[in-house]
Amino acid sequence: MLSTLLAFTLAHHNDMSPYGWHMSCERWLERSIEIQLDSNLDQESKYNLIAYLRQKVPGECNQMLT
């Protein structure tokens, strides 16, 4: 599990490649809450995964879930 997380964290995805993808701010907020509540991940893994997914959100993301 940790090796998979590290692979996602360390991977560099070019926007021109088929692996370049983005997510909305709202979806990132939802996923970050789900990750924080996941008892199968340690705190460092949670932080790294949330930070990686944040890089997939274009622009600023300062809103709250509604």
Image (cartoon, helix red, strand yellow):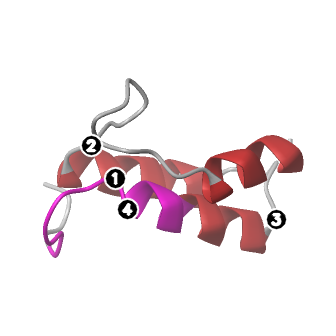
| Residue tagged 3 | 42
Q: Looking at the image, do the residues carrying marks 4 and 1 touch, with CB atoms under 8 Å apart?
A: yes
Q: Looking at the image, do the residues carrying marks 3 and 2 touch, with CB atoms under 8 Å apart?
A: no
Q: Nearer the viewer, residue 46 or 64?
A: 46
| Residue tagged 1 | 56
Q: Nearer the viewer, residue 31 or 7?
A: 7
| Residue tagged 2 | 23
Which range of residues does the magenta coloring cover? 50-62
Q: Earlier in the sequence, mark 3 or mark 2?
A: 2
Q: Amino acid at mark 2?
A: Met
In the image, which is nearer the foreground, mark 3 or mark 2? 2
Element under disc 1: loop
- Residue located farthest toward the top when viewing the structure as drawn: 18
- Residue 64 in the image: x percent, y percent? 18, 67
The quadrant where residue 62 appears: bottom left
Question: Where the N terminus falls, by quadrant?
Answer: top right
Q: Is residue 60 above or below residue 14?
A: below
Query: Which residue is drawn at the image coordinates 43% and 47% (left, top)?
Result: 31
Q: Amino acid at mark 1?
A: Lys
| Residue tagged 4 | 55
How crowded is the residue under tag 1: few (<14 C-alpha within 10 Å), some, or many (20+)? some
- Residue 25 in the image: x percent, y percent? 20, 55
Element under disc 2: loop
Real-space Cα distance between discs 2 and 4?
9 Å
Real-space Cα distance between discs 3 and 2?
24 Å
The answer to whether residue 13 is left or right of residue 56 is right
How crowded is the residue under tag 3: few (<14 C-alpha within 10 Å), some, or many (20+)? few
